[in-house]
């Protein structure tokens, strides 16, 4: 691969910039800051809500934050795009999970709600609820399960809803059909004037595929699922190494 200086770097968090202990290595942070000092814009593109990614964002100080798998986009702290479920739509989807006693998380504008007190939910920025009479608009809803027929039925409860299975846990993500990290980038291009061919994206999961495809360079992590690796222009080391730093110093800086 040739040296390529992008105008925007985009980092997924879990499984990519975050290691298995949910930390960002010092070398990776230093390399990102070095890129910023050379005029490259830094972006985070994550499935996490703003509340659950806040502690990592505070370390990175990105100019661009794409959260909730693309449902909410902030540029220099200002919301430039958002797309989510109404309170009525949220109630229908949540109700399907409650009826089958499944674990549920709901990303709202101020917090992420959850109904299970287990390690998967042991995250700052989350609020416990049993979801009884829950009626709030939301950006993204996740429900525990592996049975795709449940996911299909639940998504079919409302118009314009899609679902996606996570690769690293037995959960489904529900969002508006137009929501994706790739779609979020189209709004970023419109606002910044930076074409996607001048972007480099790093990712590891199914939700990153479109982003890897449309950016000038798509970088897949070694720990990514095989299908995601096939969409990367290059596969680097795992998220438990300083592979991102090594890539940036070899091909960008």
Image (cartoon, helix red, strand yellow):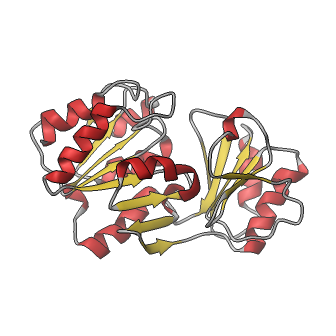
Which residue occupies 74% across, 70% down?
136
Which image quarter is the C terminus in? top left
Q: Quadrant of residue 236?
A: top left
In the image, is residue 154 above or below residue 11?
Answer: below
In percent of width and height, residue 67 lies at: 49, 58
Quadrant where the image shows the N terminus: top left
Residue at left offset 30%, top offset 27%: 242
Q: Residue lying at the far left in this picture: please name it.
A: 3
Give the image location of residue 60, x and y in percent: 36, 49
- Give the image location of residue 41, x and y in percent: 24, 58
Q: Residue at x 46, y 31 (%)?
A: 225
Relative to 133, is 26 above or below? above
- Residue 228 visible at all: yes
Observer-nearest residue: 161 or 113?
A: 113
Q: Is residue 169 left or right of residue 54?
A: right
216 relative position to 48: left or right: left
- Residue 123 placement (x, y as % from top left): 63, 43
In which image quadrant can residue 197 be found? bottom left
């Amino acid at each position: 691969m040739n040296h390529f200086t992008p105008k925007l770097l985009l980092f997924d968090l879990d499984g990519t910039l975050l290691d298995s202990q949910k930390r960002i290595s010092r070398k990776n942070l230093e390399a990102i800051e070095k890129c910023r000092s050379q005029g490259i814009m830094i972006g985070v593109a994550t499935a996490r809500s703003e509340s659950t990614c806040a502690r990592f964002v505070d370390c990175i100080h990105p100019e661009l934050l794409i959260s909730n798998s693309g449902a909410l986009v902030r540029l220099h702290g200002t919301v430039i795009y958002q797309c989510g479920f109404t309170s009525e739509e949220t109630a229908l989807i949540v109700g399907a999970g409650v009826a089958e006693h499944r674990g549920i998380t709901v990303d709202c504008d101020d917090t992420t709600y959850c109904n299970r007190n287990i390690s998967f939910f042991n995250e700052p920025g989350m609020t416990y609820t049993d979801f009884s009479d829950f009626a709030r608009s939301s950006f993204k809803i996740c429900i525990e399960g592996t049975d795709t027929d449940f996911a299909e039925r639940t998504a079919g409860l409302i118009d314009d809803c899609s679902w996606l299975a996570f690769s690293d846990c037995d959960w489904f993500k529900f969002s508006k059909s137009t929501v994706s990290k790739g779609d979020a980038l189209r709004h970023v291009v419109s606002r910044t004037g930076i074409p996607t061919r001048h972007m480099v994206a790093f990712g590891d999961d199914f939700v990153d595929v479109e982003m890897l495809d449309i950016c000038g360079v798509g970088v897949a992590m070694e720990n990514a699922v095989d299908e995601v690796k096939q969409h990367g222009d290059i596969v680097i080391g795992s998220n438990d190494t300083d592979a991102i730093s090594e890539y940036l110093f070899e091909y960008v800086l």
